[in-house]
Amino acid sequence: RQMCIRDSSYYAMPLAVTLRSVLENLSGRQKIALFILDGGIRPARKRKILRSLISNHEVETTWITPPATQLARVPTSDTYPISAYYRILLPDLIPKQLKKLIYLDADLVVTGDLEQLWKLDMGDYYALAVQDICHQYVSQTSHLNRPEFGIPADQKYFNTGVLLIDLEKWRNHQITQKTLDFLETHSDCIR
């Protein structure tokens, strides 16, 4: 099983809580390949996080600092810093032999076994996500409900804090590049 979690130093403590909650809720003894998107975590905090990972599971941790050059043209703000886009790059940053992963934001508490999510049939989808509870459809969002985007107003709007990603399909259909192209093309109207 592969999981990825985005972080910066600001999220170091919540990241440790997220990781601990994942490990505490996994059933059986499992080998976990953990990839942490590092948006600037200080070395001392990394050591503390790693110490908190003691568990019955074999955990292999890899810290990934995404290349800033790939995200040089995406719009950012105080609400959406560059690290908010890291998940888009995952299929290019994770080893090619890995075919699937669970992505988690660093501010979650996991209360169940992620094995159930891992085993979901993805069908023809690039990623599985949960429909956002506050904005269930594009028509309910001011930032996406724009004719120039070409997204139907009745399209479901999803939360990106928990994703199950088919890495192989994402790579084969160049979803990262298509997403970056979309962001660049519409950078004047994306907040």
Image (spheres, grey):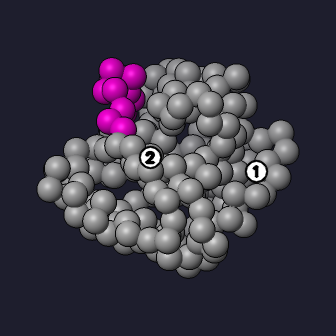
Give the answer, above or below, for where 69 lies relative to 190: above
Residue at the spot of label 1: 154
Residue 188 in which image quadrant: top left
Q: Residue at x 70, y 22 (%)?
A: 172
Q: Nearer the viewer, residue 143 or 129?
A: 129
Q: Callout 2: helix, strand or loop?
A: strand
Does 5 lie within the magenta span? no
Instruction: Identify the mark at residue 35; answer none if there is no mark.
Output: 2
- Does residue 182 show up? no
Q: Is residue 173 left or right of residue 91?
A: right
Give the answer, above or below, for where 19 lies relative to 59: below
- Tell me where residue 176 appears, x and y as whole percent: 56, 27
Region rendered in magenta:
64-75
Q: Nearer the viewer, residue 171 or 191?
A: 171
Q: Nearer the viewer, mark 1 or mark 2?
A: 2
- Tell me where residue 180 appears, x and y as whole percent: 50, 25
The amino acid type, in three-letter code, at marker 1 is Asp
- Tell me where residue 174 appears, x and y as whole percent: 64, 22
Residue 51 in which image quadrant: bottom left
Q: Residue at x 34, y 26 (%)?
A: 67
Q: Residue at x 59, y 62 (%)?
A: 30
What distance separates the C-alpha of mark 1 from that of mark 2?
34 Å
Q: Is residue 20 left or right of residue 159?
A: left
- Does residue 178 show up? yes
Instruction: Identify the mark at residue 18; answer none if there is no mark.
Output: none
Q: Nearer the viewer, residue 80 or 98?
A: 98
Whichever of callouts 1 and 2 sits on the residue coming sooner in the sequence is: 2
Q: Is residue 10 left or right of residue 69?
A: left
Q: Callout 1: helix, strand or loop?
A: loop
Q: Residue at x 57, y 49 (%)?
A: 2
* Mark 2: few/some/many CA within 10 Å (<14, 14-19, 20+): many
Q: Is residue 146 left or right of residue 64?
A: right
